[in-house]
């Protein structure tokens, strides 16, 4: 049994290609072939037009911090040992916002608008979790 | 259907407990039901519509059994702390449509004495969106904190301005003998309290208490002959906001659309509102709710709450009983908003009575601002 105590995403049919790409350390988003809308999180049908004609497009992995919080209290297993940590929404260059963590940076140095790029944490054989670290100035 | 004056609030009861290790949550539901029915002058056998939330499993039939009622209309809408405000909305629709005549809404919780960690435990589950959130450690406080941070970034809102909301709620609670926290605090006290999830401090967060309450609604005809004067539902609106496939502006909250619907139904202007009951899960909740309801422009909330405007005696008193920030918060506060607004409209509030209250606005927020949440607006009137 691994020592990883935080929640581990459950792969299902709708999210499988996303997690397979993450495992290769690549960030992919879904794009509707009918209306062109990008979407996150992954799901089978486009929320704009309900089409299920979907392609997976590779993202640059770069973006900026839309907002964040430095968490000082969380009793959840795994998290309570890593306080304080940064929870954030990242706005990707492609325009989609996703919840993640900002890592490899002192929490006090994190700011809204800060440019970041994706890094992957391999948490088991199936899942690599996309997180973000500051891009060099 | 426009719900304007199609149903009336006939009875309310706020359970006095804030700490009830000697009671079960079900008992608090039942005692609250008894209190609200007594307030209305109705009997338990009159109840033919029943609404509840916050009870696990098949809530309405579990609680119907506990109360020994057999309603012909059941509703367990569960959209967070605003659920009970939605129940008022739905009860109005059911009464207006003739589906039931006496609607009972109950709530009860022992969150405090049972040691529930409402704000900082891991709360997200395992449904599809949560797979992409819970691995990163969001907490309830953290979600609202991200809204606060973005608001500060976009509009220059300050922690001092947010603190003013907590200070005002505590001042109100200090005059309410039932409130859990009654010692007044200053802006400095808020800013010096420990940070839970930056930029929100401990005193920016609602308290945790035990408690409960109940509301009874009925038809206009029946309401006229009961013990207390009817309080009319003049308008109601409901809405939800979520991540929207990754396009959410997190300062744009559900109150905007639910408020528009409620004001349009009631046919009144913001300046007609005498007082508000606003779900104050966190200080930022009040600020963004005021903006999105349209009491001020987006970005002006920080200035709006200053100089006593939202305090008793101010231009727009909010939560005269002390709110979730100081009076009570057993996990889901929506029912207390309706109870206090009703008492204010009846003029029953003694030293915290807002003078000449004829129109009150209730707004409940449920779930997590910044992630996904519901908003329910009710406009209530005494005439």
Image (spheres, coloured by chain):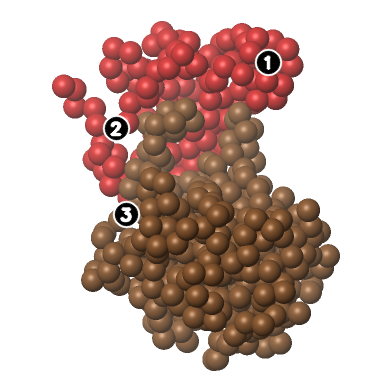
Q: What element carries label 1?
A: loop
Residue beneath disc 1: A51
Task: Please name whichever residue, B189 or B215, is drawn nearer the observer in this view of the structure.
Answer: B215
Where B368 sits versus B348, above or below? above
Quarter holding the N terminus of chain A is top left
Neighbours of disc 2 within 10 Å: few (<14), some (14-19), many (20+): some
Query: Which quadrant of the view contains residue B89?
Result: bottom right
Residue beneath disc 2: A6
Neighbours of disc 3 within 10 Å: few (<14), some (14-19), many (20+): some
The colour one sees for chain A in the rendered image is red
Chain that bears disc 1: A
Is residue B325 among the parts visible in the rendering? no
**Where's residue B152, x and y in %?**
59, 53
Upstream in the sequence, badge 1 or badge 2?
2
- Give the number of the mark in front: 1 or 2: 1
**Where's residue B138, x and y in %?**
41, 41
Q: Which residue is drawn at 50% across and 27% down?
A: A116
- Judge left or right: residue B325 versus residue B271: left
- Judge left or right: residue B206 versus residue B50: left
Where B273 sits versus A43, above or below? below
Residue beneath disc 3: B117
């Amino acid at each position: 049994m691994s020592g990883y105590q935080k929640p581990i995403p459950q792969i299902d049919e709708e999210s499988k290609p996303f997690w397979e790409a993450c495992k290769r350390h690549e960030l992919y988003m879904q794009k509707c072939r009918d209306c062109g809308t990008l979407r996150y999180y992954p799901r089978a049908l486009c929320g704009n037009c309900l089409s299920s004609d979907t392609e997976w497009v590779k993202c640059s992995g770069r973006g900026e911090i839309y907002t964040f919080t430095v968490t000082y209290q969380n009793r959840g297993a795994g998290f309570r040992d890593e306080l304080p940590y940064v929870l954030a929404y990242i706005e990707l260059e492609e325009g989609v916002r996703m919840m993640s963590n900002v890592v490899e940076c002192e929490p006090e140095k994190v700011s809204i608008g800060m440019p970041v790029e994706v890094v992957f944490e391999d948490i088991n054989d199936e899942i690599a979790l996309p997180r973000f670290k500051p891009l060099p100035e | 259907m426009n719900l304007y004056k199609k149903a009336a609030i006939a009875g309310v009861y706020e359970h006095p407990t804030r700490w009830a290790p000697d009671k079960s949550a079900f008992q608090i539901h039942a005692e609250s039901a008894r209190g609200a029915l007594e307030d209305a002058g109705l009997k338990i056998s009159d109840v033919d519509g029943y609404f509840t939330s916050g009870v696990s499993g098949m809530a309405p039939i579990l609680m119907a059994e506990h109360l020994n009622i057999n309603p012909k209309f059941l509703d367990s809408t569960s959209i967070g702390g605003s659920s009970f405000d939605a129940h008022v909305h739905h009860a109005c629709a059911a009464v207006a449509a003739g589906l039931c005549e006496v609607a009972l809404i109950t709530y009860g919780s022992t969150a405090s004495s049972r040691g529930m960690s409402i704000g900082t435990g891991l709360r997200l589950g395992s449904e599809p969106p949560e797979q992409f959130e819970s691995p990163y450690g969001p907490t309830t406080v953290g979600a609202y904190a991200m809204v606060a941070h973005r608001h500060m970034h976009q509009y220059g809102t300050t922690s001092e301005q947010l603190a003013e909301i907590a200070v005002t709620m505590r001042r109100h609670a200090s005059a309410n003998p039932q409130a859990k926290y009654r010692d007044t605090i200053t802006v400095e006290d808020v800013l010096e309290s420990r940070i839970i999830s930056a930029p929100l401090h401990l005193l920016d967060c609602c308290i945790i208490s035990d408690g409960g309450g109940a509301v009874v609604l009925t038809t206009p005809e029946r309401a006229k002959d009961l013990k207390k004067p009817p309080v009319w539902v003049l308008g109601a609106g409901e809405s939800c906001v979520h991540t929207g496939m990754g396009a959410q502006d997190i300062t744009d909250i559900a109150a905007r659309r639910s408020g528009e619907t409620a004001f349009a139904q009631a046919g009144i202007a913001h300046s007609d509102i005498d007082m508000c009951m606003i779900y104050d899960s966190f200080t930022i909740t009040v600020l963004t709710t005021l903006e999105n309801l349209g009491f001020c422009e987006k970005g002006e909330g920080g200035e709006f709450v200053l100089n006593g405007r939202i305090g008793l005696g101010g231009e727009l008193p909010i939560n005269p009983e002390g709110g979730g920030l100081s009076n009570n918060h057993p996990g889901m506060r929506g029912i207390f908003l309706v109870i206090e607004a009703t008492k204010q409209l009846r003029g029953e509030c003694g030293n915290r009575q807002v003078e000449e209250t004829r129109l009150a606005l209730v707004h409940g927020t449920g779930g997590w601002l910044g992630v996904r949440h519901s908003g329910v607006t009710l406009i209530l009137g005494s005439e």
